[in-house]
Image (tube, rainbow, N blue to C red):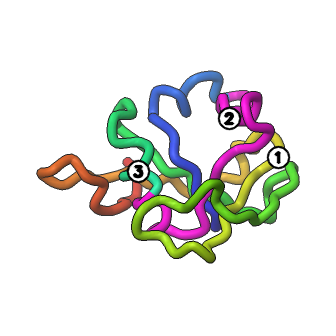
């Protein structure tokens, strides 16, 4: 599995279409994370002010039709993530049928992402 963070409101828009976040147009790829722990670090570094609920798509890499490349974070990984961690970048829209399951970010009292639980 690889993981992608998205607000529920954004994920729910155009449910019959492949999902193509702004980063695909702006940077040429969709940002993903290699595991749940790294995903939580990404949420805490970049998504603390994102609309909630915040979902994490657990993607079956084999079911994606777009190319996936594992690359180093640039300029650096988020705090708490090893510098040698590679991140999966998807060079095309995310096929909705590649989503194995949805997780929801759970927050602690200080507003930090604390865990991922099955959405629903």
- For the residue pair 54 and 97, the one nearer the viewer reads as 54
Give the Cα separation between the discs numbered 1 and 3: 23 Å
Residue positioned 54% across, 62% down in the render: 77
Give the Cα separation between the discs numbered 2 and 3: 17 Å
Say whether marks 2 and 1 touch (CB < 8 Å): no
Q: Which mark is residue 23?
A: 2
Q: In this picture, is 24 found above or below 72?
A: above
* Horizontal and vertical percent position of residue 36: 48, 67
* Horizontal and vertical percent position of residue 53: 35, 38
Q: Secondary structure at mark 3?
A: helix
- For the residue pair 118 and 19, the one nearer the viewer reads as 19
Q: Which residues are magenta?
A: 16-41
In the displayed structure image, the side of residue 98 where residue 43 appears, left or right: left
Residue positioned 80% across, 54% down in the render: 64
Judged by depth in the image, the label closer to the viewer, 2 or 3, is 3
* 46 in the magenta segment: no
When asked about the image quadrant of residue 76, the answer is bottom right
In the displayed structure image, the side of residue 90 where residue 42 appears, left or right: left
When asked about the image quadrant of residue 101, the answer is bottom right
Q: Which mark is residue 45?
A: 3
Neighbor class of circle 1 (other Cα within 10 Å; few <14, some 14-19, many 20+) is some
Q: In this picture, is 55 found above or below 34?
A: above
Neighbor class of circle 3 (other Cα within 10 Å; few <14, some 14-19, many 20+) is some
Ranked by sequence position, the earlier of labels 2 and 3 is 2
Q: Secondary structure at mark 1?
A: loop
Residue sitting at the far front = 75
* Horizontal and vertical percent position of residue 57: 56, 51
Q: How many marks?
A: 3
């Amino acid at each position: 599995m690889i993981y992608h963070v998205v607000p529920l409101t954004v994920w729910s828009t155009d449910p019959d279409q492949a999902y193509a976040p702004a980063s695909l147009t702006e940077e040429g790829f969709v940002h993903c994370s290699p595991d749940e722990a790294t995903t939580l670090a990404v949420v805490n570094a970049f998504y603390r002010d994102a609309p909630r609920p915040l979902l994490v798509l657990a993607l079956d890499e084999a079911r994606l039709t777009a190319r996936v490349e594992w690359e180093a974070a640039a300029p650096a990984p988020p705090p708490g993530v090893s510098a040698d961690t590679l991140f999966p970048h998807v060079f095309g829209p995310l096929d909705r049928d590649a989503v194995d399951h949805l997780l929801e970010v759970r927050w602690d009292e200080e507003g930090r992402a604390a865990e991922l639980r099955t959405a629903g």
